[in-house]
Amino acid sequence: MRASSTLIATLSDLRRAAARGRKTLLPKQPKILVGMATCGLATGAEEVFAALREEVERLALPYTVAATGCIGWCCQEPLVDVQWPGKPRVTYGRMDARKARELVRGLDKGELKAEWAIGLLSAYDNPLTGARTRLARKTAGVDGVPRYQDVPLFRHQVRWAMRNSGIIDPRSLDEYIARGGYFAARQTLAAMQPAEVIEQVTLSGLRGRGGAGFPTGKKWEVMRRQAATPKYIICNGDEGDPGAYMNRTLLESDPHAVLEGMIIGAYAMGAAEGILYIREEYPLAVTRMREAIAQAEAAGLLGDNIFGSGFNCHLRVVEGAGAFVCGEETALIASVEGRVGEPRQRPPFPAQRGLWGKPTCINNVETWADVPLIVMRGGDWYAQLGTPSSKGTKTFCLVGAVKNSALVEVPIGITLRRVVEEIGGGVPDGRKFKAIQTGGPSGGCIPESLLDLEVDYESLTRAGAIMGSGGMIVMDDSNCMVDIAKYFLGFLQDESCGKCFSCREGLQRMHEIVARISEGNGREEDLELLEDLAWMVRETSLCGLGQTAPNPVLTTLRYFRDEYLAHVREKRCPAKVCKQLITYRIEPTLCDGCDACVHVCSSEAILGEKKHAHSIDNAKCIKCGACVEVCVPKAVVVE
Amino acid sequence: MPKLTINGIPVEVERGTSVLEAAQFLGIPVPTLCHEDGLKPYGACRLCVVEVGTPPRTKLQSACTLAADDGLVIHTHSARVERARRLLLELYVATCPQSKTIQDLASRYGVREVRFSPKSEDCIQCGKCVRICAEQMMAGAIGFAYRGARRKVMSPFRQQSETCRHCGACMYICPVCELRCHGPQAESTLCSGCINFAPACLAYHDDAMCFLDPCAACELPGPFRKDVAPRPVAASLSPADPSGTRK
Amino acid sequence: MPAQSEDELLSQGLKMSDAIPVEQILESWPGSAQNLIPALQKIQSEHHYLSEPALRAVSRYFHLPLPQVFHVATFYNCFSLEPRGRHEVRVCLGTACHVRGGQRILDKALRELGLSESGTTSDYEFSVEPVRCLGCCALAPVVRVDQRTYGHLQQSRVPRLLKPYRSRAEVAA
């Protein structure tokens, strides 16, 4: 159904929608924004939102309270932003309902609540239009609250794919258009030939953001040349890498950017139908995307005769059913067709024979979101950032042992050291950096000696890891690398489809051997055996999952062999992680007998009178570590 | 017609031919456990991997699923291929130590020692039984289930399928056939029972993984039938466990 | 709800709770194979598991061999052949959660609900299962109960976290 009032078919329709969007984006009245992506909701954004609304209503204040996506400041969730006309936007971190109410009351009296504020934003850039939205003239910090450009987390970021995340309401089509959205799609459909679009994408040097880094322009060109019809496009939102959530955030925070990229791509490749394959573990992303498609359809931005060009494009969401291997493109296609997600051999590539045997182009969420930017600003503009072989920006999820857990977008070619130490703020609690794990289960652990590596597809592959979809997990000296290898092998032996003997059986055997080592039963020959097996699995497996599955083992063996040897030779786990090689003990001189550990111990292994030093019965102890968590004087020691 | 080179020999084959078939046409033996003429290529055993391309940019691909294409350069027995096959076979022997087919292949590839603990699995999941049942017998009575390390061949819900015609093709085609049906002396012999379809296996082994009901060999009620008690064969032999539960 | 034995609950099969009958669910999808997974997902969410009669009905409806339907039903994580509990506790074991003690949270949740391994409690109130990654890595370790996600967990917080779901279950009974 198309309501004629919201139908967007011409440039002036777009401009009218943009004007509507600007009114809600930058209203004349104060506006309070709450980050309502999954991370925010998990930390209580809903309660904060409700409290803000209630308080605003109770005091009958002329403020709008609106939801927005995720700005990526994950460690400070839930986030609340106050946008006062003519003043810099103030970001507040770690909010709760009580603080939210107090904030509203304070605002009413003109108080800033600087003690909760974590950043000031006086202007934000719009990479799509090249324009800068000034919120306030004054650019200096206020009351000791740092400006965004002075916050280390944001200083090195270039937010291209995430241009709207945390700025617009993801449910507002008008706000997306107000930020320059759908102008690129109109430009494409009205004035560009498919070959011209692909030329720009090729010129931009954009490479697949899902991890393998295949040049997008090349893939599109192969698709365009296929004679067979119909052709399909697919957005791969099956973000299965543990430690990566950039696609979820994009789908939840800026769904129309992905849709617009897909419309442009469909036009360039001659496809009329597309699918967004989103994993079922991301219910909010699925909801947001379905809403966005419905809005775009209602506005005539999806469907038949878009922008009066005669071009038709239909998109729909398919929910994944929970299988990591379905991130592999041929497995994903099998899953859409209603079969089990078992990859098949390429060639033929999906661009030749894909969904229902027809030419199919599969690109990652982030790749699609980059496309409008390239069309709007030109391929050479996009290529201004990056390294000679990899252009543009990439989003990374920086998590684990870093001070600032965050979702960041940086120019490709930035050094890992800068990402970890400056953006991430380094390792907290006085611990020592040990490794950074990139690329999920297909990636590897990179040691400190390689931190000056400039991040691009080739450099990470040379280091034995991969770019992957962009998860970066920082590990400190409390993480055991043998345990990490065991973890990934456990993951992969479950998530492998199991068709290839080499991958199914090889991974099980590797897991068996690493488990043996972590239990202190390893032999020195096991390391060589592991390397042999890893080589065999990599060489003989059919799909990308099997071919990269040995990476976590190979990189840990390469860079942290001494840890394996400590487990094998000395039956010792240097990081004190491997359960079979550690014991818990209470240091009597530190224990104040508070009984906190006694209450949390599920196996009644802690002995001793209240107010007297306790001790642990090692026969009963199940090494769950609950006592360590609750011990205030840190009297429980692991040996 | 695609022209390709296999081990330096130029060969021209019909479109649709696989590299494995092209190699076999030239008389080059390429080992495989999951390929069978008349069944769709499956590519699961990985033994038929060949080196594709010209150095330094080469990769290993399974010959059975690789279509012969113009200009392909194939090496079926390069050092890299041979090392991969040796390691694969070492793992195969450890997985199914009692299979004569696997032992023979391993011995041909010079596997002298097995560094993994033996597992005595019944199945290498080559998928021949599943494919012959669906593609040639048009029954579709058995299939794969689960994934990863838990993946296995089974009939749904471990129940006798209504579409099974007891043709025995699954047992016949199994490359580690003695594992489908252990036979009377599973401990001491490499293969018995199902090759010559006698003596009756299910009467001796209550844990045999047999999909037939009644068994094509012994005509005894299969392990899944609950309504019929197994026919006693001889007083000295213990009858099959009618519940057919396995491990 | 009166106490029921596992067998009774299982034998109820398709009728469990007020779920939409399988046949009715199937009718809303055209019978082409691409709808197989969405249909199974709907049955799973309505009935909390895929029963044998349900899978047989699906196989007939889509004209697909039962082994193929069975493989799909056992391949994907979101399907279960055993009834799942009223509340699904999914403990994230992604990398970030793993390095911050996700496994310990899982073990604690299992102990708390009297389970020895991941699965469903005997009263069908809770299912506890590990999940690969919920994509909330910055909040590690993370647990999702039904639709709600909890972050920054510690073992000591697990009992408190489960409590409201428990009492709600008891009130319903």
Image: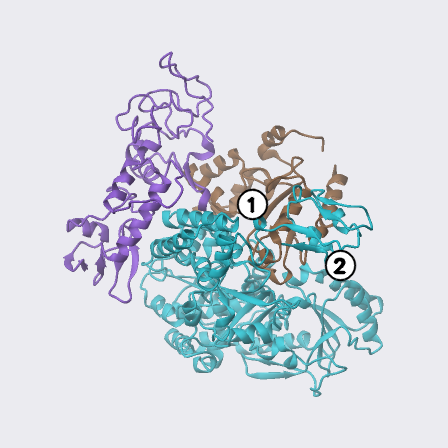
Q: Colour of chain A?
A: cyan
- Left or right, residue C82 beside residue B213: right
- The residue closer to the viewer here, A538 or A107, is A538
Chain letter, disc 1 residue? C
Q: Colour of chain B?
A: purple
Q: Name above or below for residue B189 compared with residue C37.
A: above
Q: Name above or below for residue A162 compared with residue C73.
A: below
Q: Colour of chain C?
A: brown
Query: Mark 1 against mark 2, which lies toward the viewer?
Result: 2
- The residue closer to the viewer here, A400 or A373, is A400
Q: Residue furthest top?
A: B235
Where is mark 1, residue-wise? Answer: C42
Q: CA distance from mark 1 to mark 2?
A: 51 Å
- Left or right, residue A214 beside residue A151: left
Chain letter, disc 2 residue? A
Query: Looking at the picture, which amino acid does disc 2 mark?
Result: Pro
Residue C31 occupies quadrant = top left
For the N terminus of chain B, give its image quadrant. Answer: bottom left
Q: Name above or below for residue A500 compared with residue A272.
A: above
